[in-house]
Image (cartoon, rainbow, N blue to C red):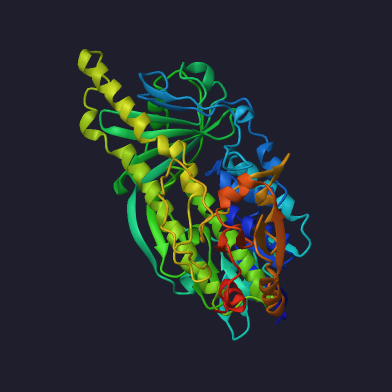
Amino acid sequence: MTPIRTVETNVLIVGAGPIGLSLAMELGWRGVACTIIDEGDGSVELSRGGMVSIRTMEYWRRWGIADRVAGAGFPQEYALNMIYCTSLLGHLLERDDFPCQRDVRAPPASPERRTWCPQLLFDPLLARALAERPGVAMRYHCRLDGFEERADHVLAHAVDTRTGERVDIRAHYLVGCDGAASLVRDIAEIPFEGKVLGYSINIYFRAPRLLAAHDKGQAERYLFVGPEGTWANMTVVDGRENWRITVIGSGDKMDLERFDARGQVRRAIGDDTVDFAVTAVRPWRRSEMNARHYRRGRVLLAGDAAHTMSPTGGFGMNTGVIDTVNLGWKLEAVLGGWGGPALLDSYDAEQRQVARRNALASTQNYKMWTGLSDLCGDILENSGEGERARREIGTMLKQGLRVEWECVGVMLGYRYEDSPICVADGTAPPPDPLSDYVPTARPGSRAPHAWLGPGRSTLDLLGRGFVLLRFGGAPDPAPLVMAAQTQSLPLEVVDIAQPEIAALYERSLILIRPDGHVAWRADTVPSDPADLVRVVRGAG
């Protein structure tokens, strides 16, 4: 019998989708050796995600790939509008005009801008960037068959699907980034709880002359409304000839043998003469789910393996990237010996609440899509009643879905309330609007962006270890620095002289975690700095 080969790594990542690749980027950037395994070959046949949030772009700025993502190949001049209509050649209900990617500017609250980069471009881009990271091993055509948790490691059993070779991978930690049907979650026996919101079928099709065939113009999203209400939406994929229609249905409509994909595309176009070719049809279940635990021993979950949400808003993938950065620095800390025994538990405590918050925002958007059926009976009529119905529904959609397109509050305003590794300062939680973001340096929140000079943000100071920002008039932080050194906490002190930045942060001493969230702030050095260090490193 051929002996089973054993491979060793610090972290084994199961799943080479955008979340697994992002976790490997974060770990590789930190110098933590890791291995990714995936049963596929790295190609993306069906592009699902496309919107890269401002927060995700901030992290990709950290990794040095933000410019690559923005220039990955999606047409810079393609207008990212939102169109509400009965069909492409039917009635226009309303529209929201947004600039093309070339003209998008970063908002005042961030050094980065929201970017459109379809998954078929950014998955390969991340994989190429990972090839530049020493210590990151990528193993495609490698299927996980099971794993066992031992006292000081996880032993995963995998097989090369091309050769049949069996490989054991010994890792300090295993992270399941293997999607909503996660095998890692199942083997770890972690319950997945929540609700089904509905059922949909994605139709992928190619139509090179589609834009020239209708008068609605370019758009990121076309939302189709019929007498039954909102029945589908069409999303741009590559900005040229590839498109995705999502048909909203019920469980019985997921029967592909009875589903007329070509008929649905023709209905969306509103004409039978436009040439197109259906390339794939995929049913899926729209759900709002959350794992009961994101950690069980040495096994952790991230992305859709940990939480699912309706794609209305594009929050799913971007919430998963937040998972990876929160988890990445904590794995480095524990593997490096300075992370305390409660540090990895804080990943569960912090990220589960973010996932719940963002999932609720996604569901709110979806309910806006589907809550119109009682108003749509006359929507196709060429009459006064039809005109009134179209005007009323268009206004409702434009106003109600603005949060889906302008969601800076969702992606920047999340915070870690009651985190076991942040120290509250007694201030009340600020409002949490989904569309707007009000910068705050309150503990648990994302440290605010401000320009230190041309092209240099306060966010560029953060990431490698803890950072203590010291503003004018602050006391000498030497006792805190000494406590950090004693406990091996990596800490850099940065003096900032600009009074406008001091006003933004509201205190003279701000301790910021490697993921860019404020851990503590005050105007004086704590009376027991050693205790503060123990808390923020998970040893309190």
Q: Residue 47's image quarter?
A: top right
Residue 15 visible in rendering: no
Please state which of residues 302 and 155 is positioned toward the viewer in this rendering. 302
Q: Residue at x 48, y 66 (%)?
A: 424
- Residue most extreme to the front: 473
488 up-or-down from 385: above or below: below
Q: Residue at x 31, y 30 (%)?
A: 396
Please state which of residues 265 and 343 is positioned toward the viewer in this rendering. 343
Please state which of residues 488 and 405 is positioned toward the viewer in this rendering. 488
User: Which quadrant is the N terminus positioned in?
Assistant: bottom right
In the image, 241: left or right of 290?
Answer: right
Q: Position of residue 59 (x, y in %)?
A: 63, 51
Q: Position of residue 30 (x, y in %)?
A: 72, 63
Q: Residue 365's image quarter?
A: top left
Disc tally is 0
User: Which quadrant is the C terminus positioned in?
Assistant: bottom right
Q: Residue at x 38, y 23 (%)?
A: 94
- Residue most extreme to the top: 383
In the image, 180: left or right of 64?
Answer: left
Please state which of residues 465 and 394 is positioned toward the viewer in this rendering. 465
Q: Position of residue 362 (x, y in %)?
A: 40, 47
In the image, 14: left or right of 90?
Answer: right
40 up-or-down from 242: above or below: below
- Residue most extreme to the bottom: 151
197 up-or-down from 465: above or below: above
Residue 81 visible in rendering: yes
Q: Position of residue 331 (x, y in %)?
A: 63, 70
